[in-house]
Amino acid sequence: MENEVKQQEQIKLSQDFQTLIAGFFPNTKYFDSRFDLLQVQIDESRRNQEQIKDQLKDFKGDTDKRFEQAKDQLKDFKGDTGKRFEQVDKRFEQIDKRFEQVNERFEQVDHRFQRLEDKIDNLIERIDVKIDGGLKENRNLIVRLFTFALSFSLIAVVGMFGKLFGLF
């Protein structure tokens, strides 16, 4: 019995010792639960990483689609702009043609005015010639009439003197 008591005391001491040590040092269950928690967190992080990777792939795909759409829209815009500039160029060509026509028309009008000016100059010159001729004729007539009037006056004065002096 003594042996048994000694053994029980030894067992009791070892249990006390284990309890004391267990109080200072965590047991394997503690580490197991901590490692399990860490493993769950790691697994969750990996799932989150996979989700983020999938979201990034989706985002990249959406972004690529948007860039392709933007490129297509830009090509369409460039095409439309090119067509509009071609239309504007055609309109400018039409306007240039119209300006050429207007310019030709102004040249025709200018030519007509030049011809009218020449005709008016010729008319004025003929009128000047006629007026000059008429003035010469009028001068000649005036000189003849003046000469006639002077001659008549001279005859009248001579007649008066003749009557005064009794010559007639």
Image (spheres, rainbow, N blue to C red):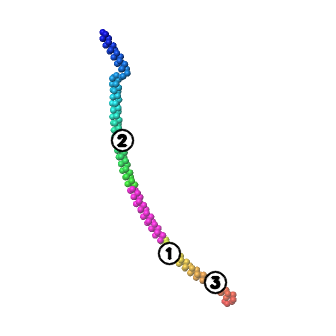
Residue 65 placement (x, y as % from top left): 34, 42
From this view, report whether residue 37 is shown above or below residue 136: above
From this view, report whether residue 116 is shown above or below residue 22: below
User: Of callouts 2 and 1, which one flags the residue occurring earlier in the amino acid sequence?
Assistant: 2
Q: Considering the numbered disc 1 on the image, is that residue within a helix, a strand or a loop?
A: helix
Residue 85 placement (x, y as % from top left): 39, 53
C-alpha distance separating marks 1 and 3:
39 Å
Residue type (three-letter) at the residue carrying disc 3: Ser
Give the number of marks: 3
Q: For the point 33% across and 17% down, which residue is it?
A: 14
Q: Magenta span has 160?
A: no
User: For mark 1, what is the residue?
Assistant: 126
C-alpha distance separating marks 2 and 1:
91 Å
User: For mark 2, what is the residue?
Assistant: 63
C-alpha distance separating marks 3 and 2:
126 Å
From this view, report whether residue 26 is shown above or below residue 123: above
Q: Give the range drawn in magenta.
A: 89-118
Q: Relative to residue 44, is residue 140 drawn left or right?
A: right
User: Most extreme residue toward the right, as rendered?
Assistant: 165
User: For mark 3, what is the residue?
Assistant: 153
Residue 151 placement (x, y as % from top left): 61, 84
Q: Considering the numbered disc 2 on the image, is that residue within a helix, a strand or a loop?
A: helix
Q: Relative to residue 27, is residue 117 drawn left or right?
A: right
User: Of callouts 1 and 3, which one flags the residue occurring earlier in the amino acid sequence?
Assistant: 1
Q: Are the residues tagged 1 and 3 within 8 Å (C-beta)?
A: no
Q: Nearer the viewer, residue 126 or 98?
A: 98
Q: Which of 64 and 158 is in front in this view?
A: 64
Which quadrant: the C terminus? Answer: bottom right
Residue 64 placement (x, y as % from top left): 34, 42
CA neighbours of label 2 inside 10 A, class few (<14), some (14 to 19), many (20+)? few
Q: Considering the numbered disc 3 on the image, is that residue within a helix, a strand or a loop?
A: helix
